[in-house]
Every structure is written in C-alpha cells, then in structure tokens.
Image (cartoon, helix red, strand yellow):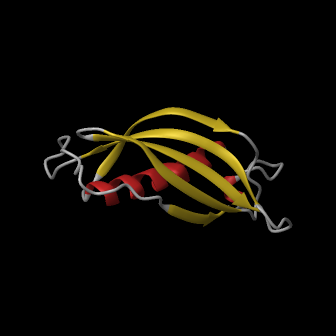
Amino acid sequence: MPANANPAGDIFGGWVMSQMDLGAFVAASEHAGMRTVTVAVNSITFEKPVKIGDTLCVYTQFKKIGRTSMTVNVEAWVHRHDRPRREKVTAAEFVMVAMDESGRPAPVPQTKQPSISEVDNEA
C-alpha cells in the first residue's frame, strides 16, 4: 500500500522484512507447537524492489533444528500484476527460539518433520 512505500513506489525494506519475520514465526511456531521469538536475522539480501500493488509471497524452509532454536531460510517473491511469473525479491535467514509459558527457551520437538509455509500479502 502507498503508506508502506517511498515516493518512487518502492515498498520499504522494513515492511518486507516484517512479513518475512511473520512467515518465520508461523513456520517455527507450528513446528514447535508453541510460541517462538526471533533472536537473530543472520542475513538478508534485497535483490529486487517490491512495488505498490505487488502481491508478496513468503516461503520458508528449515535449515537447522536445534534443541531450542530453529534456523529458517525465508524467501520473498512477488507476483506483479503486469507479469505472469513470480520473481524472487528478498532472501534471509532467521533464527527462532521456542518459548515456554514462563518466557524461557523450551525444547523443540524433534519427531515432527518441518514443513514449508507460505504467507501472501499485498503490498
């Protein structure tokens, strides 16, 4: 939306990153079966701009599952209204930690298979 963009119509990187963080949160929380928090973003690369009117699609894949943490690779792709194919615009690596009811790191179940999650938002 225009409120999330600069005067040239490019969506702010912080908005894109927040959508990617949400995707990492959904994937990690579903896998852990509990609340998770972001503890690090090891890398983020903005490869192409996201424009007003683009539909942002966020995809996640687990890179590593530790005792209490999960490293999640997150990619953002756009579907532009004037083009038939999606384009990759941003890639990042988020580290998420499972939290118990007391707000302490909690063990992540190792028996479940990680899944790929998808979140779509219109810019």
Using the image, determine if residue 102 lies above or below residue 33. above
What residue do we see at 13% from left, 47% from top? 102
Q: Locate residue 96, reporting x and y percent.
A: 36, 43
- Residue ID at (40%, 53%): 25
Residue 7 in the image: state x and y as whole percent: 81, 49
Q: Is residue 17 left or right of residue 113?
A: right
Specify the quadrant that holds the C terminus: bottom right
* Quadrant of the rendered image containing residue 29: bottom left
State the image quarter where residue 68 is shown: top left
Question: Vertical placement of 120 versus 65: above or below?
Answer: below
Horizontal side of 49 relative to 56 (left or right) equals: right
Percent x, y of residue 19: 54, 54
Q: Position of residue 97 (x, y in %)?
A: 30, 42
Q: What residue is at 53 percent from the left and 63 percent from the top?
A: 119
Tell whether 89 sits left or right of 121: right
In front here: 32 or 121? 32
Residue beneath the point at 67% across and 55% down = 77
